[in-house]
Amino acid sequence: MTYAGDCIFCKFAKHEIEPAIVFENENVIAFLDNNPAGQLVGHTLVLPKKHYETLDLIPDTTLGEIIKVIKILVPAIRTVSGAEGVNIIQNNGKVAGQAIPHAHFHIIPRKSKDGIYFEEKRRKVVPMEQLETEKAIKEELNK
């Protein structure tokens, strides 16, 4: 495994510091967030044990394993927390809200009117924007 020496999540993965681990296998670890969103219990972080700073750096096989772990955890978290649904969130880069530079996913249990909002300050699409953006992304993918 490759770890970053000062990364708190790497320290969790190596068991140098013991978080509240809810799932662990050879490549993936999941533990309760120490600073959970909302009032429900169960906000969980799921991440590769090996250090990758952002999602695009995680190998596809490991990423697939992480998604399978999330799929296993969601029903258990919903039951324990009494949630009506969950958010699965993955932030890339500090400007996008990634506080720890070790790629990870949040499973956030949700209830109606729980006071957690992600839809603030949305903008309207200007004419032709979607078509031009679609074309530019497809061209970038074909490079």
Image (cartoon, rainbow, N blue to C red):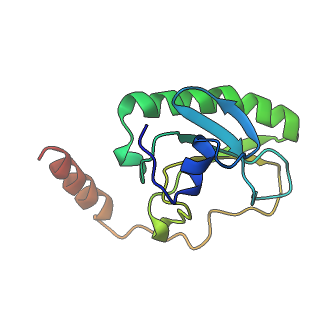
Up-down relation of residue 6 to residue 78 (above or below)? below
Image quarter of residue 85? top right
Q: Quadrant of the N terminus?
A: top left
| Residue at 49% over, 50% down | 103
Q: Is residue 45 above or below residue 37?
A: above
How many numbered discs, if any? 0
The answer to whether any part of residue 63 appears in the image is: yes
**Who is closer to the viewer here, 21 or 142?**
21
Q: Position of residue 36 (x, y in %)?
A: 76, 57
State the residue at coordinates (41%, 42%). 2
Position of 82 compared to 105: left or right? right
Looking at the image, which residue is at 58% across and 41% down? 14
Q: Nearer the viewer, residue 13 or 37?
A: 13
| Residue 89 visible in the snapshot | no
The residue lying toward the viewer, choosing from 13 and 113, is: 13
Against 15, residue 67 (above or below) is: above
Q: Quadrant of residue 117?
A: bottom right
Say which residue appears at 14% left-offset and 44% top-offset.
142
Residue 44 at x, y = what percent? 70, 45
Asked if residue 87 is positioned above or below residue 38 in the image, the reply reads above
